[in-house]
Image (cartoon, rainbow, N blue to C red):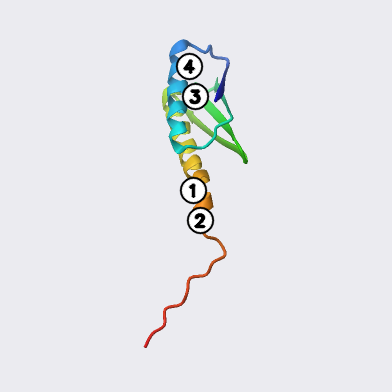
Amino acid sequence: MKLNITGKNIDVTSAIRNHIESKFKKLEKWQVDLISCQATFSEEPNKQKKFEASISVPKGQLTASAVHEDLYVAINEVEQKLGRQLNKYSHKHEAKRGVSPTPIEEE
């Protein structure tokens, strides 16, 4: 998985890079082929930190963003959101759509 990290108005330090990489490593447990990841964080005018991430998967792209005063909390929120999206994506083939349940006959 290729990971691009971009900082707008904030320098990308090694601590931030390591934290983002460790969070994105956790997303590999869903056993979905992650093609590439793009992570962008910036500082808003009101001292809020905005973190956005998008992951390319074989049949589309998953995107999540979060705004918080602490950048690490925003990264954690985005990781949780992407985890939920990957869970839904990986179990999508198991969903049985268009099949109506058989009615239960009463005596």
Sequence-wise, which precedes: disc 1 or disc 3? 3
Q: Nearer the viewer, residue 79 or 33?
A: 33
Sequence-wise, which precedes: disc 3 or disc 2? 3
- Report the amino acid beneath label 1: His
Sequence-wise, which precedes: disc 3 or disc 4? 4
Q: Are marks 2 and 1 in contact (CB under 8 Å)?
A: yes
The answer to which image quadrant residue 72 occupies is: top left
Q: CA distance from mark 1 to mark 3?
A: 35 Å
Mark in front: 3 vs 4: 4
Instruction: Estimate the x, y position of residue 86 in percent, counting from the top left.
Output: 50, 40
Q: Is residue 43 visible?
A: no
Q: Which residue is mark 4?
A: 17
Q: Which residue is mark 1?
A: 91
Mark in front: 2 vs 4: 2
Q: Which residue is mark 2?
A: 95
Q: Is residue 94 visible?
A: yes
> Which numbered dot is residue 48?
3
Sequence-wise, which precedes: disc 2 or disc 4? 4
